[in-house]
Amino acid sequence: MTPLKPRIWIASAALIASAGALAQQAPKPEQLIKWRQSTFQVLAWNTARVKAAVEGGGDARQAAKAAAAIAAIANSDVLALFPAGTESGKGWHDTTVKPELFKDGDKVAALNADFSRNANELARVAAAGDAAALKEQFGKLGKSCKSCHDDYRNTN
Amino acid sequence: MTPLKPRIWIASAALIASAGALAQQAPKPEQLIKWRQSTFQVLAWNTARVKAAVEGGGDARQAAKAAAAIAAIANSDVLALFPAGTESGKGWHDTTVKPELFKDGDKVAALNADFSRNANELARVAAAGDAAALKEQFGKLGKSCKSCHDDYRNTN
């Protein structure tokens, strides 16, 4: 390994030192991708529980708990799992995200806000035990999910 | 394939028909195992965000959102992901659950209730922005996680 010139070395060391506190905390891309793939699986579990209640045969209290979990996740800044540097890579499997997600900041933020709003409303009507409202709102949440998947997830 | 005797066939068909509504909803063991492995990953992501805030360098608002997600998941009946029939099997990977979890009903329920209580308290202090209380409560939640892992998770 060729030693760096002293001046460059000193500059690099200072940069590393100042970034140290952050770098210690920053999870690796593969970890972030695994967490986001897991997050969507947990959303799938909980939407399955709401779906079971909406379609009959499911338990309304389980649906209310599931809707509360969906809302808390939707409000927890899921976009923090999509930082620059995670456009490709492998978590549980190769990421299926499209590169456009990392370029369409405002549109993605708006879709995420829409997801949060719909998830909060789902949690509200599920807690109130209003079956008709739950069915209607579950449909709206599904559209919210789909609109983001259509634009930013590779399905093949 | 040998045809079943008519009387047995009729009895089997009736059993299948009556179980049909439930069977339609019931996810397969591999799906449940994948969901529970994902759930623990999402808990890991969110505890990492709280840890970052507790140890400095993390964002307090992210920590509050993360704590709310932990609480909602803890309240969402995670034990529903451990039904009989999921003692072994592969989700993202082979399950690491110990068989004792499926036998120690009361003890497991008590540990789960303890986890919920600690997670709800974490969400409360994180939302209040009390850094000292957050640190203390994060320690308590960690012990709650560990007590269950020690008894019911294989680590090798």
Image (cartoon, coloured by chain):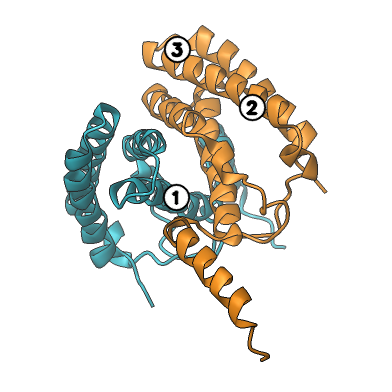
Chain colours: A cyan, B orange
In front: label 2 or label 1: 2
Would you say residue A97 is visible in this rendering? Answer: yes
Q: Amino acid at mark 2?
A: Ala
In front: label 2 or label 3: 2
Q: Kindly identify which residue carries mark 2.
A: B109
The image quadrant that residue B148 belongs to is: top right
Q: Amino acid at mark 3?
A: Val
Q: Kindly identify which residue carries mark 1.
A: A45
Count neighbours of disc 2 (C-alpha within 10 A) and say few if under 14, some if 14 to 19, many if 20 or more. Answer: few
Look at the picture and state if A59 lies above or below B116: below
> Spatial distance from mark 2 to mark 1, Cα to Cα?
21 Å
Would you say residue A14 is visible in this rendering? Answer: no
Q: Quadrant of the N terminus of chain B?
A: bottom right
The image quadrant that residue B152 belongs to is: top right
- Counting from the top left corner in percent of width and height, residue A115 is at 24, 45
Mark 1 belongs to chain? A
At x 51% / y 30%, what residue is drawn?
B74
Q: Give the secondary structure at mark 1.
A: helix
Seen from the viewer's position, the closer of residues A2 and B31 is B31
Seen from the viewer's position, the closer of residues A78 and A73 is A73
Count neighbours of disc 1 (C-alpha within 10 A) and say few if under 14, some if 14 to 19, many if 20 or more. Answer: many
Judged left or right of residue B106, residue A120 is left
Q: Kindly identify which residue carries mark 3.
A: B125
Mark 3 belongs to chain? B
> Spatial distance from mark 2 to mark 3, Cα to Cα?
25 Å
Seen from the viewer's position, the closer of residues B19 and A29 is B19
Judged left or right of residue A114, residue B21 is right
- Counting from the top left corner in percent of width and height, residue B130 is at 44, 9
At x 54% / y 17%, what residue is drawn?
B117
> Spatial distance from mark 1 to mark 3, Cα to Cα?
28 Å
